[in-house]
Amino acid sequence: LAWHCIVVNVISFISGQMTDLIYTEKELVQSLKEYIQAEEAKIAAVKSWADKLDMLTQASTADPEGYLAHPVNAYKLVKRLNTVWSELESLVLQDPSDGFISNISVHRQHFPDEEDEKGAAKALMRLQDTYRLDSESFSKGKLPGVRYSALLTVDDCFDMGKTAYNDADYYHAVLWMQQALRQLDAGEEAIVSKVDLLDYLSYSVYQMGDLPRAIELTRRMVALDPTHERAGGNLRYFERLLSKELRESEKSKPEPSMEKPIDLSTYERPRDYLPERETYEALCRGEGVNLTPKRRSRLFCRYQNGNRNPRLLLAPMMEEDEWDSPHIVRFLDALSDAEMEKIKELAKPRLARATVRDPKSGVLTTANYRVSKSAWLEEDIDPVITRVSQRIEDLTGLTVDTAELLQVANYGVGGQYEPHYDFSRKDEPDAFKSLGTGNRVATYLNYMSDVEAGGATVFPDFGAAIWPRKGTAVFWYNLFRSGEGDYRTRHAACPVLVGSKWVANKWIHERGQEFRRPCFYIWFSRCCQKRCSFHYPLSFIYNQCKLLYKCLSQC
């Protein structure tokens, strides 16, 4: 629910839509081949006519008078000029591209636009930062869990750098322009010129505060194109700045650098609005907290029968402890393959850019820190949704009558949801006011796909990383029994590096849980106030469990 007034463009296509685009492209390729065949047939027909007419004109021009002396030749010449050449003109004017143009026009409305391309580039940069992958790893397709090779050309890398450059993101502009230059220096063919690359790279390096390298790159540009309109001026400007810095610091002029390759450690990545960025990304990379043996001994697996719920007595659910405090559990085989496919089928036509609730207005809106597509599924849309909701109620012991609709979300490559709270805090009293069901007491999260790389659910406050496992579900409480928010549950959905992540979550609200999850905090305090000879302050009771039980035994 955290809110940031930062708007960036993000990729808005989910994996299902991207799959559709693959088949659309295949259809367009077939249409293009048919167009080529039609053009080739047209050229062949025109060439055949040209050969025939060439033979006729060679004979007629050798002896024009003798040729026309024959009445048949005179007739055929008139006929050719009146009929044949008109037919040939019509043939040449035929446009076999009509079918192809019509086909591509129909599909164009579903094509990604410039903003989507920009979003896709930023998704790669997001993955690059989170998983500490250098530009060369992406360029050569060296990613974990990939089944297909995919290479980035010089021009691809240049376009990536230009996207960052146009957003004044000089950190990423340097990384990608440097990779483009490295591939170009290695002899790879490209449309972009080395001078243009050096122009962007030298200025980006200057913006990162590296004057010696900016000077070295600009000198290379001047050597390649002495007449470049900016190169000479930039070089003189950079040299003056460097001289000024050296005078002020009383240092000697540095030796010309050999332009060492730029990598992820060359420059410090600029900090952004997220205070726990480094912790969050470390958890996404699998650098989480390892529980001590003592804490691991508190984790168990069991069969959950929902407090002898009739629907679970004969088929109890397997349950595993994922974390001890706060308590996070995972239910195994929470959804069948058929149920997951049905939920996806129902969600796909309803998917739209995922939203978050503005804590001030309570209105759902998009935000750059949540990059996914989501859909809300009504209970009565299909028996599967009703069955899943009932299962959640049976397993958790909480009523879902006041819960929000089942939300299905799809995170494609680069899809993420940065650290956030599911519950509303004290400074956001109107976040769920329109629902009239109180705060979000608990979160139930179904994983409906395995993810080849990335996509973990992480909790930066205490260092847990929960990895997606198809068919399982995780559950945790967002509120203490007192109704106070458990700020430790701030969590995030890590960017998907390889694959596609499908989840279906249920946010369970306070209303209706009064007797299912009673607030002993208040009960105990009232008990002590009324019947005990002494009264513990609420905060003391809350923190001192042994004394609380003593108080309870006296009541």
Image (cartoon, helix red, strand yellow):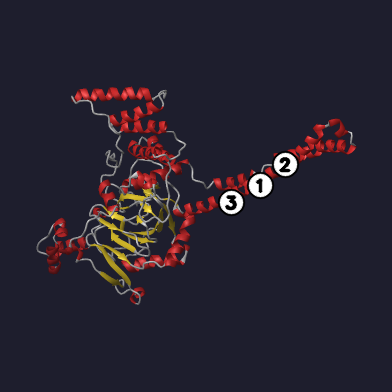
Q: Nearer the viewer, residue 555 or 267?
A: 267
Q: Nearer the viewer, residue 334 or 238?
A: 238
Q: Quadrant of the C terminus?
A: bottom left
In the structure shown, which secondary structural element does the residue marked by tag 3 occupy?
A: helix
Query: Disc 3 or 1, which lies upstream in sequence?
Result: 3
**Residue 38: numbered disc:** 1
Query: Disc 3 or 2, which lies upstream in sequence?
Result: 3
**Residue 64: numbered disc:** none
Q: What residue did someone put label 2 on?
A: 91
Instruction: Please indicate whether residue 86 sits to the left or right of residue 271 in the image.
Output: right
In the structure shown, which secondary structural element does the residue marked by tag 2 occupy?
A: helix
Amino acid type shown at disc 1: Ala
Q: What residue did someone put label 3 on?
A: 30
Amino acid type shown at disc 3: Gln
Instruction: Please indicate whether residue 465 sits to the left or right of residue 119 in the image.
Output: left
- Residue 423, x across and y down, in percent: 30, 53
- Residue 245, x across and y down, in percent: 23, 25
Alpha carbon separation for disc pair 3 and 2: 24 Å
Asked if residue 286 can be seen in this view, the reply is yes
Query: Disc 1 or 2, which lies upstream in sequence?
Result: 1
In the structure shown, which secondary structural element does the residue marked by tag 1 occupy?
A: helix
Instruction: Please indicate whether residue 35 sits to the left or right of residue 452 in the image.
Output: right
Query: What crowding class fits label 1: few (fewer than 14 Cα within 10 Å), some (14-19), or many (20 or more)?
Result: some
Q: Quadrant of residue 232?
A: top left
